[in-house]
Image: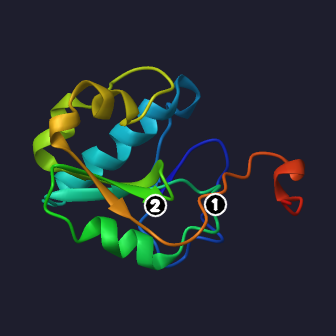
Amino acid sequence: MVVGAIDLAEVLTDQTVVDNRDWQSGLSSSLRAGVNEAQRRGYDSVVVGLGDQPLVPSSAWSAVQATQSPIAVANFGGRRTPPVRLSSEVWPLLPTMGDIGARELMRARPDLVRDVACDGDCLDIDTVEDMAPRT
């Protein structure tokens, strides 16, 4: 779990916590912090997701993780969204600055990407209004 602006140590007691001290520089620094920790631990892939998508089920995470594609992205009814699996072979291609994640890499290198059909809801909750029932 990569954290930045808010200290979540009290609630993240069973997770590995990576502190991104450069969080204010954008999403790419959080992605890089997580990948650097995975590399330090000798992992060959990471699955990246967002903390503000609480309705993405564990089955989506598992389905994305189970692929062998260099990049695998969850697809919820035609909408590509995290979780995204990134194999170590693409880590050097990830952005190093700015408020972007793997999306630009997926656009630039569609040959590396596999969509994974997932059940669930990829609702992204950024505001109180986002939690209102949808019609």
- Percent x, y of residue 132: 89, 59
Q: Residue at (33%, 24%) from the top-left corner?
A: 96
- What colouring style does the render use? rainbow
Residue most toward the top? 97
Residue at mark 2: 17
- Percent x, y of residue 37: 28, 52
- Res. 44 image quadrant: bottom left
Residue 19, compared with residue 54, is above or below; it is: above
Q: Residue at (64%, 54%) from the top-left corner?
A: 7
Residue at mark 1: 8
In the rendered image, the quadrant that contains the C terminus is bottom right
- Percent x, y of residue 99: 51, 25
Residue 124, compared with residue 43, is above or below; it is: above
In depth, the one of 20 and 51 nearer the eye is 51
Q: Amino acid at mark 2?
A: Val
The answer to whether the residue labelled 1 contacts the one labelled 2, judged by CB atoms less than 8 Å apart, is: yes
Left or right, 7 with reference to 101: right
Q: Residue at (35%, 49%) from the top-left corner?
A: 34
Q: Secondary structure at mark 2?
A: loop
In depth, the one of 71 and 22 nearer the eye is 71
- Circle 1 crowding by C-alpha within 10 Å: few under 14, some 14–19, many from 20: some
Q: Residue at (50%, 36%) from the top-left corner?
A: 21
Q: Secondary structure at mark 1?
A: loop
Q: Amino acid at mark 1?
A: Leu
In depth, the one of 45 and 14 nearer the eye is 45
Q: Who comes first in sequence, dot 1 or dot 2?
A: 1
Residue 54, compared with residue 7, is above or below; it is: below
Question: Label 1 vs label 2: CA separation?
Answer: 9 Å
In depth, the one of 88 and 53 nearer the eye is 53
